[in-house]
Image (spheres, rainbow, N blue to C red):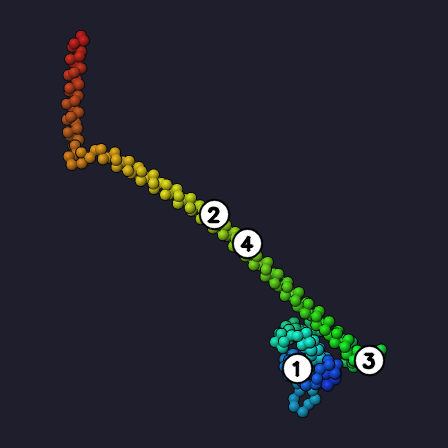
């Protein structure tokens, strides 16, 4: 629902000012009905008339069509402007209502009116494009921040991986060192292999030690006797 607007123009008059056929205007009011007032598409039997708002919408449609925009693009832009409360909808130029001027002929007045509408449309497009650019730049900044964060995380992961590699190398060195110690000890133990099958008991060691001690004591006694 667009709201209340002063109805001031019939379709035939708008067609003259916009330099399009009446059939084209009637096709537009059907195609873009959601953006027009009810008077642009009245019940059967009533006269079709265009409010100021309808004229502004249809003038925008005419300019967009002349600029080569397809109906889908025009519909999209109208939907955006409608959602924004028609804030960016171009105003009608001066002398649009009667298509005349005190000093210029009708065809020149219509031409200048069209140029004014085109200028307003371009200004609206420029504003819309700038908003899109700002949104795109904001998105780029967000993505760049995410990339930087990912790079920092990647660097931290690489540092952690390097630390793990160093720890692994140290662990492997320890394994090799321990293997060498094991081999050395096994080699030393192999020298006592003859005791594997006939192990010497502690008692036998004590007896042997006692015998050796007696022999040493006797030898010392003999030496003392000889000396003295």
Q: Which residue is mark 2?
A: 159
Mark 3 against mark 2, which lies toward the viewer? 3
Which quarter of the rendered picture does the C terminus lie within? top left
| Residue 120 position within the rendered picture, expressed as x and y whole percent measured from the top left | 72, 72
In-image side of 226 versus 174 (left or right): left
Q: Which residue is mark 4?
A: 148
Q: Nearer the viewer, residue 82 or 143?
A: 143
In whole angstroms, how far apart are the C-alphas of marks 1 and 2?
A: 65 Å
Can residue 155 be spotted in the picture? yes
Which quarter of the rendered picture does the N terminus lie within? bottom right
For the point 64% across and 63% down, which residue is it?
134
In whole angstroms, how far apart are the C-alphas of marks 2 and 4?
A: 16 Å
SS class of the residue under badge 4? helix
Q: Earlier in the sequence, mark 1 or mark 4?
A: 1
Above or below, comparing residue 224 to residue 81 in the picture: above
In whole angstroms, how far apart are the C-alphas of marks 1 and 3?
A: 28 Å
Task: Give the mark count.
Answer: 4
| Residue 53 position within the rendered picture, expressed as x and y whole percent measured from the top left | 70, 78
In whole angstroms, how far apart are the C-alphas of marks 1 and 4?
A: 50 Å
Q: Earlier in the sequence, mark 2 or mark 4?
A: 4
For the point 65% across and 90% down, which residue is it?
44
- Which mark, residue 28? 1
SS class of the residue under badge 2? helix
Residue 25: which quarter of the image?
A: bottom right
SS class of the residue under badge 1? helix
For the point 71% across and 79% down, which residue is it?
55
Q: Which residue is mark 3?
A: 105
For the point 62% across and 61% down, which residue is it?
137
- Contact check, label 3 and label 4, Cβ < 8 Å: no
């Amino acid at each position: 629902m667009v709201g209340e607007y002063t109805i001031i123009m019939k379709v035939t008059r708008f067609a003259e000012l916009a330099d399009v056929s009446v059939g084209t205007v009637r096709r537009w009011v059907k195609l873009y009905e959601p953006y027009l007032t009810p008077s642009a598409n009245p019940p059967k039997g009533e006269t079709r008339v265009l409010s100021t708002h309808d004229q502004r919408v249809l003038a925008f449609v005419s300019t967009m069509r002349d600029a080569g925009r397809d109906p889908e693009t025009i519909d999209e832009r109208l939907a955006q402007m409608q959602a924004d409360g028609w804030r960016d909808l171009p105003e009608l130029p001066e002398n649009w209502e009667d298509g005349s001027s005190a000093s210029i002929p009708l065809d020149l007045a219509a031409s200048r009116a069209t140029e004014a509408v085109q200028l307003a449309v371009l200004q609206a497009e420029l504003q819309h494009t700038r908003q899109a650019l700002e949104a795109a730049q904001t998105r780029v900044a967000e993505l760049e921040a995410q990339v930087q964060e990912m790079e920092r995380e990647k660097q931290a992961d690489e540092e952690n991986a390097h630390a793990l590699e160093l720890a692994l190398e140290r662990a492997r060195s320890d394994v090799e060192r321990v293997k060498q110690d094991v081999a050395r000890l096994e080699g030393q133990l192999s020298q006592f292999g003859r005791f594997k099958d006939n192990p010497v008991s502690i008692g036998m060691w004590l007896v042997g030690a006692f015998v050796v001690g007696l022999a040493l004591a006797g030898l010392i006694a003999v030496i003392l006797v000889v000396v003295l």
